[in-house]
Amino acid sequence: MNRKVIIIGSGPAGLTAAIYAARADLNPLVFEGNQPGGQLTITTEVENYPGFPEGMNGPEMMDLFRKQAQRFGAETQFKHVTKVDFSERPFKVWVGEELFTSDSVIISTGASAKMLGLDSEKELMGYGVSACATCDGFFYKDKKVLMVGGGDSAMEEAIFLTKFASEVWIVHRRDELRASKIMQERVLNHPKIHLHWNSVIDGILGTKETGVTGVMLKDTQTGDVREDSCDGVFMAIGHTPNTSLFDSILDTDSKGYLVTKGESTATNIPGIFACGDVKDSTYRQAVTAAGSGCKAAIDVERFLELSD
């Protein structure tokens, strides 16, 4: 059966697109992918989404989004798309050997925060390890936190964390930052920010019950390892947009994010739309992703009306 719209990816963007598309009677099919619910599923508490004054557990919030989309007729499947063919309409989408076709496609595959690759990091993600200072900084009032990274975004997030934390230590593998001069000056002159030069995190200490209690820091020049206590570890070593499926098919920017036209969610192929973090390297918030999911569904509805 050919669909009017297939949504590849979930999270706030994909599931909001599904809500709007379902309410427009487009009967969307959503492939939620390997991480159903997107990055919010590794966020223990969401306190900055409007309408939830008491805060909300990330996975629970995504479950509410999903149920709302299903209520209006969206079909959601926990399947991972393995191949696409956007060369002609109807577009082709494969899950393994299974083929699906659709008159339009919304891409909301998101972006993944780059991590250090430590087992302890995976174990404690959401329990003291975070990749989003603006999401989780509030939980570290009067606490000591570490920020990993040396670029502008790491500096911005470190400064943001000083609103809450008693001290912020930047862990950087070299003896100079790669951030812009103005950001370096702000950080180096900030009374709450300190630096661990020539250092990398070799392990993160703590449990899900206690949260993060400290880290093992390795000196990149001598190889010496020392323990340092802290209450949280923030990663700011970049994001990777999940666009490998669309390599050489859709236009991307220099960082690999999908490019859309003007204020719309339209890509370079008519009928293919993109929303959420897969096209947004700037804001990366649940509320902005949801807003762009709404735009994508409206863009699809207008596209289908004009192309029928």
Image: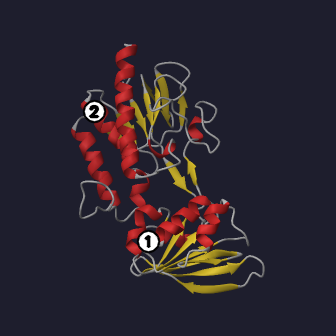
- Count every numbered label the image shows and give the total: 2
* Rendered-image quadrant of the N terminus: top left
Return the residue at label 2: 22
User: Which residue is at 65% across, 78% downward?
Assistant: 196
Report the amino acid beneath label 2: Ala
At which x and y percent is residue 15? Answer: 34, 43
Give the alpha-carbon distance from disc 1 to disc 2, as whole Å: 41 Å
Where does label 1 land, which residue?
163
> What element does badge 2 sit on?
helix
Can residue 118 be spotted in the picture? no
Badge 1 element: loop
Percent from the top left, x then y, of residue 213?
48, 83
Which of disc 2 and disc 1 is earlier in sequence? Answer: 2
Q: Is residue 48 left or right of residue 170?
A: left
Instruction: Give neighbour class at mark 2: few <14, some 14-19, many 20+ (Cα, 10 Å).
Output: many
Judging depth in this view, the residue of 72 and 219 nearest the camera is 219
Q: Are marks 1 and 2 in contact (CB under 8 Å)?
A: no
The outermost residue toward the right is: 221
> Picture coordinates of residue 308 (x, y %)?
37, 13
